[in-house]
Image (spheres, rainbow, N blue to C red):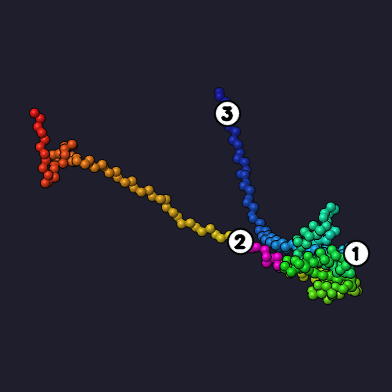
């Protein structure tokens, strides 16, 4: 007898559960727009003219000008020259590039032909042309009232010498604040003289042009009959001559013998 094949029936397993969709959480607040960078201030160059005997006073002034130098202000004096540079050539180049001239007046400064007759005189020439601002700082008592500097406002306040202040730092602070005001005026002049970028105009839309139409070809004309010939028609053949015009007698052709 045939053995009955046992059929194994598989039990249906548990139905697979689909993962539940996660609910979207609360939206994060939008990030604030980054602030626009401020436009850079135009650079201002200051030329410092001094006697080497007043080197300590120049150094103290540089210290008080440090906050201003972090605002795109650059100071230059002959100590910034490299070894081997020509003295007069380099000084003349820096004088041409400078916007502000600061002269530290003292008896030694007035006695120096180079400081007074060359550097200060060149600066006053540029001031007359409107290309430089000149600031005179009185360090020590000297006869500055008999010079051309007497006609201008001096620093510290009222032309009071630095050595007559109770505190030298207070005097140099007053000088630095006065130079800052001059730098602000120079920047206004530079900003007004800078060319503004031209605005781009939207391109004008060109009118749609149709492609040029080709002219219709002219019909070819049939060549007309030659003179002395009659067109072919009813009762005419090619080669026949036109009848003689009225008033003319046609001469008879001679007959062959």
At label 1, counting other C-alpha atoms closer than 10 Å, the crowd grade (few under 14, some 14-19, many 20 or more) is few
Q: Position of residue 217 (x, y in %)?
A: 33, 46
Q: Nearer the viewer, mark 1 or mark 2?
A: 1
Q: Earlier in the sequence, mark 2 or mark 3?
A: 3
Q: Nearer the viewer, mark 3 or mark 1?
A: 1
Residue interval drawn in magenta: 188-196
Which type of secondary structure does the marked residue at label 3 adopt? loop
Disc 1 to disc 2, C-alpha distance: 52 Å
Q: Position of residue 74 (x, y in %)?
A: 79, 61
Which type of secondary structure does the marked residue at label 2 adopt? loop
Which type of secondary structure does the marked residue at label 1 adopt? helix
Q: Mark 3 = which residue?
A: 5
Q: Mark 2 = which residue?
A: 198
Q: Mark 1 = which residue?
A: 53
Disc 3 to disc 1, C-alpha distance: 123 Å
At label 2, counting other C-alpha atoms closer than 10 Å, the crowd grade (few under 14, some 14-19, many 20 or more) is few
Q: Position of residue 216 (x, y in %)?
A: 34, 47
Disc 2 to disc 3, C-alpha distance: 95 Å
Q: Residue at x 78, y 60 (%)?
A: 92
> Magenta segment: does it hold 194?
yes
Q: Are marks 2 and 3 in contact (CB under 8 Å)?
A: no
Q: Residue at x 72, y 61 (%)?
A: 40
Q: Position of residue 170 (x, y in %)?
A: 87, 71
Q: Quadrant of the N terminus?
A: top right
Residue nearest the viewer, comparing 35 with 54: 54
Q: Earlier in the sequence, mark 3 or mark 1?
A: 3
Q: How many marks?
A: 3
Please name the predominant secondary structure of the magenta segment in the image: helix
Furthest-top residue in this view: 1
Q: Quadrant of the C terminus?
A: top left
Residue nearest the viewer, comparing 37 with 223: 223
């Amino acid at each position: 007898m045939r053995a009955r094949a046992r059929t194994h029936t598989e039990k249906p397993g548990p139905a697979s559960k689909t993962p539940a969709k996660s609910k979207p959480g609360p939206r994060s607040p939008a990030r604030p727009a980054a602030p626009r960078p401020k436009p850079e201030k135009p650079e201002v160059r200051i030329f410092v003219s001094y006697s080497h005997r007043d080197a300590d006073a120049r150094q103290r002034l540089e210290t008080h000008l440090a906050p201003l130098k972090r605002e795109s202000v650059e100071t230059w004096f002959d100590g910034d020259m490299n070894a081997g540079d020509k003295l007069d050539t380099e000084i003349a180049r820096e004088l041409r590039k400078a916007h502000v001239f600061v002269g530290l007046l003292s008896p030694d400064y007035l006695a120096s032909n180079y400081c007074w007759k060359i550097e200060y005189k060149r600066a006053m020439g540029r001031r007359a042309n409107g290309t430089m601002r000149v600031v005179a700082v009185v360090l020590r008592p000297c006869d500055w009232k008999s010079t051309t500097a007497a006609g201008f406002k001096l620093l510290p306040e009222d032309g009071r010498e630095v050595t007559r202040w109770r505190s030298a730092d207070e005097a140099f602070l007053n000088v630095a604040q006065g130079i800052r005001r001059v730098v602000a005026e120079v920047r206004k002049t530079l900003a007004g003289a800078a060319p503004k970028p031209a605005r781009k105009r939207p391109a004008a839309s060109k009118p749609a042009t149709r492609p040029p139409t080709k002219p219709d070809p002219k019909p070819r004309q049939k060549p007309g009959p030659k003179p002395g010939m009659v067109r072919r028609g009813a009762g005419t053949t090619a080669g026949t001559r036109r009848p003689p015009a009225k008033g003319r007698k046609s001469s008879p052709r001679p007959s062959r013998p």
